Amino acid sequence: MARRLCAAWVLLAVLAPVHAGTTLHARMLHLQGMALHDIDVSLDRAPDGQLQWSVQVGRADVPALGWHGVGFLLQGQLQRLRADVWSSQGTVTVRAAPGGLLRKGQPYRITLDTGADTLEVDIGPQPRPTISMALPLDQLTHVQSQLTRMPVSWLQGLVAGSGTLGKGTLSGTVAVDKHPSGVAGSAVLNLRRAGFDGGRFAAQKLDFRGRVNFRTDAKSRRISVAGVLQGGEVLLGPLYARLPRTSTQLGFTLSGHGGAWRVDGLRYADPGTLNLAGRFALARDGSLHSVDISRFQASFPAAYQRYGKTWLATHGLADLTTKGRLGGALAMHGGSLRRLRVQAGDFGVVDGAGRFRVQGLDGGIDWSRQGDRGGTSLSWKSLAMYRVVFGQGTSQWRSQGGTLKLQSPISVPVLGGQFDVQDMAWQPAAPKGQRLDARATLDGVSMRKLSLAMGWPEFHGTLAGAVPGLRYDAGRLTFQGGLTLHVFGGFVDVTRLALTHLFGAAPELSADIDLQQLDLKAMTDVFHFGSISGRMHGTVHGLRLVDWKPVAFQAQLLADGGGRISQRAVSNLTSVGGGSAIGGIQGTILRLFKHFGYARIGLSCTLQGNTCRMGGLGPEDNGYLIVEGDGLPHLTVIGHQRQVSWPTLISRLRAAIRSGGPVVK
């Protein structure tokens, strides 16, 4: 009994029958898990005969609650109800407590029943105080509390170092036990409009009803949650959710140690929208260390709007239109994929930026880093990449020894031709550059249909090619082999083709292009450039497009077999080169002729940054020769501008062509 009364002395020592005017002082008092410094207790009698008392603590340290250097003052009246029962009412003020706990004086009521070995403390307005606590005097390490609309911020000390509690209120019952290195407890709680900011974990305007178990010590924290959410916004690592006002089921265990965090036993159910189960872990720097989603089932578009929209937008996939169902499983560790299973049901997605479209996706894939998985089938009604639409198709897959393999060739119609994939093998866990191996061919694609799809002037001819290998490394897709366009009576060969971040905010393309025996008459007729006869060859090497706009290339175009050129084509070539046309007779007479003979035409441009370095057949009269005439009147076109800004050159070409040229959108 002496030990129990000593432990309670700081709060209620004056409730013993002592004389008025008593003053006690203690420099320090140590209780289990608690240190009190500079304690002053006084008892006096008011003019009306009532006993008055005060307890002031200069500094209180309770590490388990995150209290360091907290001071408080208790003032009130004292009344003896029975021989072994004392009661006190007054106000309590706390200084420098986490979350601003009781920094403004709050009413209290304390009842001590030494016969029953109980201490009851109520803080807040009566008859429904904000906090009601019951402490057994023979076990001061145990506290039971009833909370009524308590500010969530008052619990800031419990999450010290993990984040900041925001607005909101908390109601319910809480049982807490102090153990040698921290606290443990359980609670049945009702959170209203609560907020928390822990960096990678955050919430605001959150409503929750359910059970919480917790245990904290100097090195770790563990919290188990099971209940119902209604509304609010939540951030869990890389996942952001805007929760519905309807009830969603949530359960998980959150544990933290040394700055790293784990979420185990995650269970979430938003009926008709998203169901998932799994676990994930965050490293000390907040990055995703591992994730294991053992089961997920999502229905669209609701799942995208509530849970995927913001996250996908951070990856350059904003403004999607979705439908259908997706389910499956996913496991990653240290950034490496370990397991992927996807099952689709009439799934469709359309990119708002027009980069891709998938319609009627059914079936799935099942891949594992280890062992073999059963065969799967994946089919679609249509696929589109930018403006190129592929027809329906079906593919068969099987995972063996960490490789997902295509079991039989795929043939898909595209723009009047065929796109055939003979082989494809994907190894997500292989070293970069060795994860994708594929062979494909493209045959008979109508250039007319491609021109119409892309909004180009109408070309005639076909597109074909073979890709004996694909390499994917750090977002860069490199094509072995090449594509050949049979256009304008000649050939355009595309080699060293590579695509980077194809569906990102700024896709990049690089390639080398070789032109062979193009019919200039057919080409200039299509582009309305004026008439030029003959054949042209040339190169466009080191081509690099960013967001489909040229930023670098070295282009050389040459027609060296002779032919005829119209007055309009002469004028346009002169404009592009920023030069002049001269002949064996004066320009006024020159304009009388509609066509001229030429021996050679040559033009070059090296684009670097925003400037094009121009050239032609060779140096000529402080410029460069573009057209070398043949016969009479003898025509010569000379370019004088060596450096031309790329926007200026484009505007000149557009003005010359008028109808516009091929622009990738």
Image (cartoon, helix red, strand yellow):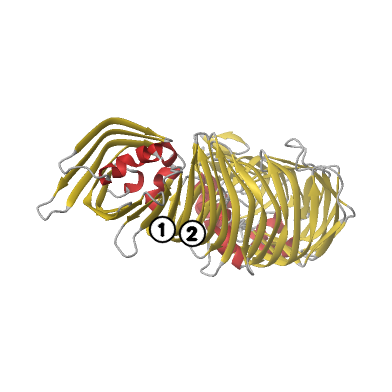
Tell me the SS state at disc 1. Answer: strand
Mark 1 vs mark 2: in front? 1
The image position of residue 260, as x and y in percent, is: 56, 38
Q: Quadrant of residue 395?
A: bottom right
SS of the residue under disc 2: strand
Q: Amino acid at mark 2?
A: Leu
Query: Which residue is located at x 48 percent, y 59 percent?
Result: 189
Q: Which residue is mark 2?
A: 189
Residue 213 percent location from the top left of the image: 55, 50
Q: Residue 174, can we see it?
A: yes
Closer to us: 505 or 116: 116
Decide: marks 1, 2 in contact (CB < 8 A)? yes
| x then y, percent, for residue 483 | 78, 49
Q: Is residue 360 left or right of residue 614?
A: right
Q: Quadrant of residue 271?
A: bottom right
Q: Is 151 displayed left or right of 417 in the figure?
A: left
Q: Residue furthest left?
A: 47
Residue 641 can be seen, yes or no: no
Q: Nearer the viewer, residue 665 or 265?
A: 265
For residue 659, what is the image quadrant? Answer: bottom right
- Which residue bears the numbered disc 1? 147
Q: In the rendered structure, which disc, 1 or 2, sits on the residue that comes first in sequence?
A: 1
Q: Which mark is residue 15?
A: none
User: Identity of the amino acid at label 1?
Assistant: Leu
